[in-house]
Image: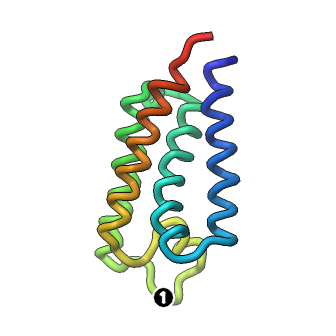
Amino acid sequence: MSSRIRPAAVAAAGWIALVLIFLYAHGWLRGFVGDAVVVVFLDAFLAMIALGPIASARARLITVGTLSMGIECLQTLHLVGPDAHWVLHAVLGSTFDPWDLLAYAIGVAVSAVLERRVYAQRD
């Protein structure tokens, strides 16, 4: 199996999971599990394209972890108001929640396992 097929399969599964979570889940499942899954999806997507500075697993994990946790911390600035478009709420969020940081850390940990055990396997 090609080195890009494994992360592509994980990215596709992650995308399907995110759509199902967004459409049908509520409460902690939508918030906490959705945040962890989005990190795994982003890492898998970046592993699938593996270009330039994000070609290494370490760079991808640092990028996705920093991006997700950075966006969460930006929420303390209240840049997305209650009347903002739903896409902004879905992508950037509007309320800081320290539990989201834990969800992102779990997502990075799962991604690290996938990077080492699934994506890096030789055919």
Q: Quadrant of the N terminus?
A: top right
Left or right: where 109 falls relative to 45:
left
Compare residues 48 and 25 and report the one nearer the observer. Answer: 25
What number of labels is visible? 1
Left or right of 77, for residue 116? right
Question: Does 43 sit above or below residue 58?
Answer: below
In the figure, 97 relative to 12: above or below?
Answer: below
Query: Residue 57 at x, y = what percent?
Result: 43, 28
Mark 1: secondary structure: loop
Residue 80, horizontal then vertical, whole percent:
44, 78
Q: Which residue is mark 1?
A: 82
Quadrant position of the C terminus in the picture: top right
- Disc 1 residue type? Pro
Q: Residue at 48% x, 60% y: name it.
A: 35
Looking at the image, is 101 positioned above or below residue 50? below
Residue drawn at 47 percent across, 29 percent down:
115
Name the residue nearer the viewer: 69 or 54: 69
Residue 76 locus on image (x, y percent): 29, 75
Residue in view at x 63 percent, y 58 percent: 18
Graded by Cα atoms within 10 Å as few (under 14), some (14 to 19) or many (20 or more), the crowding at tag 1 reads few
Q: Nearer the viewer, residue 91 or 41?
A: 41
Q: Quadrant of residue 13?
A: top right
Quadrant of the rendered image containing residue 94: bottom left
Colour scheme shown: rainbow
In this rendering, the answer to whether 106 lies above or below 26 is above
Of all residues, the one furthest to the top in this rendering is: 123
At a point 34% along the width and 66% down the height, the residue shown is: 99
Specify the farthest residue to the bottom.
83
Q: Is 48 displayed left or right of 100 in the figure? A: right
